[in-house]
Image: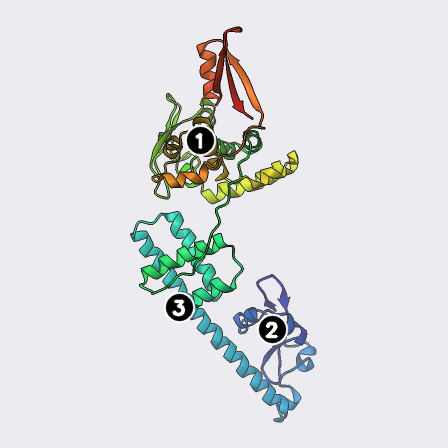
Amino acid sequence: MRYLKNGEAIQRWLCKNCGYRFSDSKAEKDCNQTNMLKYAQKVQRQVLNSPSALTFNCQGSGEALSGAPSANKAVKTLAEVETRIGEAQREGAASRITTDIILNYAWKAKKKGLAESTITQRVIRLKQLTKKGANLMDPDSVLTVLATNNWTDNNKKVFITTYKSFAKTFNIVWEPPKVRVQRRLPFIPTEEELDQLIAGCGKKTATFLQVLKDTGARTAEAIKLKWIDIDQKTCTIRINNPVKGSLPRIIKVPPKTIAMINKLPKTSEFIFATSANSIRRNFYKQRLRISVKLQNPRLKQIHLHTFRHWKATMEYHRTKDIKWVQKLLGHKKLENTDLYTQLINFESDEWHVATAKNLEEEKKLIEAGFEFVRYSEKDEVAIYRKRK
């Protein structure tokens, strides 16, 4: 039996007369050529005593032994198989060479100090280019792949940036094509929608989302948080492992967030003790379930980075201080902050309104994210509000 990658089994026959292995003609058409080449010499079980083995589509029986035309056909078929196997071996060698080149690039990028996540994404992009038929050492073939594939401008720009770095590493002269990327406004959900996602997720994922919401940190920054980065007395979280060239920062969070963190098991020095990909996969599964349950398709548009967009936008709307938002996000350049602070018309939005009669109640409202509106002398209360 011959077994394919998809789990299907195809009967292979061994002729007693000619000694050639062969398949059913229909099976040959159904086979994938790559699998045929890979498994051409692999026979796990040979059926020798079946009556069909002597006559069924035999390449060399009868006439083959007497020098008839079918014998020439059998020899020709065998030569074609050997040629295909040789081509597959050469392709395999070329594939190994390409893999070695990509690994060499990754090692040089690491020595230059590039972030681990950046190197990983660039390696993935380079492998995608080779799968599309590009020769990484031939810039013209890379241009051909970029021109012939129906990628979005944003995606194409990422490929261009990746190969530009690769070409620079190996001193390859390459003039990248021009791509105009239109900046799109980020999707900004309501706070109620974010809270619905947090409430519907499991304990670890919910805590992770709450940290993203209160700090505006990136996923890669939040996943690296350690227990020593949490200050329970001051209710602050230190972002000590910023990514993408951002600055370290200390962010004050509500006591609720600190309490959620403290409920997690301390199995390592890291709070979440998992990978970003694992967190992301779990979030997407739970997001789909919550979206269906609440019949709210808008929830499907919320990604982990959406929490950062929401935090920056709301902070700018609350303070109107772009420098404060820049410091909150850890940006070194002010122009990078503009992407996260798109002004939105909130005039039609609804508000949660609360009042405070003393200083202690005011502190609780401020910690919960309420902002002061005015003081009512008639009722002797301070009026606060928070967007829904």
Residue 316, disc:
1
Q: Earlier in the sequence, mark 2 or mark 1?
A: 2
Location of residue 350 in the rendering, given as x and y in whole percent from the top left corner = 58, 25
Residue 138, disc:
3
Q: How packed is label 2: few (under 14 Cα within 10 Å), some, or many (20 or more)?
A: some
- Kindly identify the amino acid type of the residue bearing the numbered disc 3: Asp
- In three-dimensional space, the C-alpha distance between marks 3 and 1, rounded to whole angstroms, equals 47 Å
Q: How packed is label 3: few (under 14 Cα within 10 Å), some, or many (20 or more)?
A: few
Residue 223 can be seen in this image: no
**Nearer-the-camera pick, 208 or 46:** 208
Q: Quadrant of residue 150?
A: bottom right
Location of residue 194 in the rendering, given as x and y in whole percent from the top left corner = 54, 32
Q: Which residue is mark 2?
A: 46
- Kindly identify the amino acid type of the residue bearing the numbered disc 2: Gln
**Which SS class for mark 1?**
helix
- Kindly identify the amino acid type of the residue bearing the numbered disc 1: Tyr
Judge from the rendering whether residue 75 lies leftward or rightward of residue 124; answer left or right.
Answer: right
Q: How packed is label 1: few (under 14 Cα within 10 Å), some, or many (20 or more)?
A: many
Residue 6 can be seen in this image: yes
Residue 50, disc:
none
Judge from the rendering whether residue 6 lies leftward or rightward of residue 123; answer left or right.
Answer: right
Q: Quadrant of residue 326?
A: top left
Location of residue 267 in the rendering, given as x and y in whole percent from the top left corner = 42, 34
